Image (spheres, helix red, strand yellow):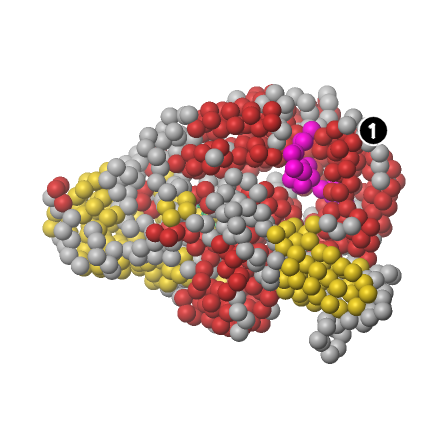
Amino acid sequence: MPDSAPHTTRRADYHPPVFLIDTVELDFRLDPAATLVRARLAFRRNTPGPMRLDGVGLTLLEASLDGTALPQERLVHGEDGSLTVEGVPDSGTLETLVRIAPQENTELSGLYTSGGNFYTQCEAEGFRRITYFPDRPDVMSRYTVTITAQRELCPVMLSNGNPGGTGHGKDGTHWVRWVDPHPKPSYLFALVAGELVTVHEPFVTKSGKQVSLNIWVRRGDEDRCGHAMDSLIRSMRWDEEVFGLEYDLDVFNIAAVSDFNMGAMENKGLNVFNTKYVLAKPETATDGDYQGIETVIAHEYFHNWTGNRVTCRDWFQLSLKEGLTVFRDQEFSADQGSRAVKRIRDVRGLRAAQFPEDAGPMAHPVRPESYIEIDNFYTPTVYQKGAEVVRLIHTRIGAAAFRRGMDLYIARCDNQAVTIEDFVSAMQEASGVDLSRFMGWYDQAGTPELTAEDRYEPESRRWVLTLRQQIPPTPGQAQKHPVPIPVAMGLLDGAGTELPTRLAGENEARPGTRLLLLEGAEQSFTFEDVPAPPTPSLLRGFSAPVKLKGVAPERLRFLAVHDTDPFVRWESGLQYATGLMLRMVEQQQRSEPLGFDAALEEAVRTTLRAAETDPAFAAEALALPGEGFVADQMEIADPAAVHAVREHLRAEIGRRCADALRATYDGLAESGEYRVDGRSIGRRALRNACLAYLVAAGDTGLASAQYGSAGNMTDRLAALSLLADAEGPAREAPLADFHARWHGDDLVLDKWFSIQAMSKRADTPAAVRALYRHPDFDLRNPNRARSLIGAFASGNPLHFHAEDGEGYRFLADAVIALDPINGSIAARLIGPLGQWRRQAPARAALMQRELRRVLDTPKLSRGTFEKASKALA
Ligand code: B3K
Ligand code: ZN
């Protein structure tokens, strides 16, 4: 446990900053062991109070005020590392000189080294590890940064903004200056320096401004930047076209680093990226990797306006920038390919990560009320549910009003640090729609449950739909209020034809999808002139992030085949299969034989027959609900039973539909050049979905053949992940081959670790222990740590929940070892242990025991403490 109880920060305690900093001059003298940072802050009083500057792990060497050295007694060092300067005037210049040791920085927050180069990560509170500063987002300043280093050590030196000069010093040093004309909060500061090479493209904005685009990587990686650059250019164009937003500096730099805590970071003019989201070529990256790059490049670029020009007043408003920017990147990706498939994937992701979070011990509103460690709140709730709430507003007011709202929001809030209310009121003013009740979506945790009941009145030809909502209690929020839920819907007749609809009080029937708004706990909608009992198609496009419950299986089957809305077709198939699997899990628990539902075979055959029109959609439709998703629907999860049922169904489908699966598989064989457009990706996804069923039915040889002949990583890895479940040489040979081929390539080697960590084989828990000791395993590298520990704990429910508790023990051991190295990653990885309430008593007890063991560890980081203690509360 930490030495003293960690401090909780509360949203209600917000106070404006005591001092504002108008300009910052930073001078860096880079050295891996001892970097010197001189900071000149032009300050100005904003409210009464002392000048307290944040700082962590800094060695203060000098301090002066308006050119006069400050005596020790006016410098008060806090236990948290902060510095209070006594007796300061209402405005002036404070200068400090501090020493830091980037090469000792294993937290990867602040300034650190990776492979001999220098990188920074400042969001949320890393800048205080670089210099003394009011490290909070509502202090926005103009920065001038001068970097000096040995020319050989750092031929390239980058920071935010535009180039502002270079020069040579004596003793082999050189310096580079960067000037950022835009005021920004400290979390957007960045510095990158070292031996890097660039891939360059020019860009001209729609108003004719020249921009130099550069991606900085290690020598040898230049041939893997094409997709990232192409994605960047498409993102820049899209933001101009869709939102009228242009880039605002002369250069846009992206630097890729292999030691990085998250995906990427939107620092002004100098994005820093995990190599995973930059580097790709067909031999090393899968289609999923390509799509991830496109999304993350777009996301970070879009932050330039939603996050950087308009930023957050405090970290409780995090979703103001993250929810909105995820919404923007989702829309961008939807416009690049199939909107329906993109929506399906996003909903799949929301359900896999956010719904369980909303039902677990860390459940929090999109705008949280309190935190111990803000790093713990970069969550699926803040990001993905936050994006859903922006989408709700978009759906409610329509695209045109939403665009007007964005224009107003940006015009009004440019260069300011604002709140979620500022965003919602811009949308409200631009649309004329009262959005006050939508704030409930920001302030209440928990996933609303929606139920629908309907009745048909033949005499009056009326059809009445009653919608009800209920939000389950979450930690600290027992009582909930109804939230506005837009329900996009339509009606189908018995032949599956879409009916025009007319609500009571309307003059004319309208064709196609319409929007109902459920505002209270319960509401009925009466439809007129309905010729016969219809089948309702509800929540088209997943128009709200809710759980729609209780749709009858026969309706699901009908909708899965006939609905005009592709999302509902997919969703109905998924829900039908989920219901079936839940019933089979009960059979499994009673040791009854597992049967088979002929409707599944029919569905697979129908999907394969129509696959040619949209192979990506077909691949989504073919996938059975994941083990995690099925377990999440159970009061008390039973990972082993769920696994057995799913495997049984996969093998049955593979066996019964072998002819059609094999025909599709053969028909989709890649010919010609490898391409990463939506259709080609869809074809590979579908082909590999067929392969998975055929292997489940026993055709391991097909996977071995594909492994040997694959011309790209997508197909190679799809085969290898199936072979990783096999016995004997079918498994060992390709795994050894893969390692021999790729052990020098970190990103590919991560895949080798993950595949084994997710294997279904009985010896996986022991294999994972052995991999943890493998010479290529490195706890310090976040990607590698995630590739083994994260893949096992989050991606292998069967073995993570092994009956003897070995999975839990392994995770706790790893977290305890990692916490002193990188508390932020340790806190992230511990998450799955928090789900003990949904396990049977014996497992729950084992999980709690491991959480307690973590909590009893001396000097635990704040982040891991918060996660473990809340999980046990
Ligand atoms: N804003 C960063 C995330 C920072 C996480 C800090 N723990 C990346 C992003 O969301 O774009
Ligand atoms: Zn973001």
Q: Which amino acid does label 1 sit on?
A: Pro
Magenta span includes 638: yes
Identify the residue at horizontal 75%, vertical 72% (top origin).
502
Q: Residues within 10 Å of mark 1 (few under 14, many from 20)?
A: few
Q: In which quarter of the image is residue 513?
A: bottom right
Magenta span includes 87: no
143 relative position to 790: left or right? left
518 relative position to 153: left or right? right
Q: In which quarter of the image is residue 98?
A: top left
**Residue that numbered label 1 is attached to:** 593
Identify the residue at horizontal 45%, vertical 60% (top origin).
420
Residue 403 location (% of width, % of height): 54, 69
Q: Which of 300 and 563 is in front in this view?
A: 563
Find the magenta span and give its range: 621-640
Identify the residue at horizontal 60%, vertical 69% (top origin).
398
Residue 40 location (% of width, % of height): 22, 52
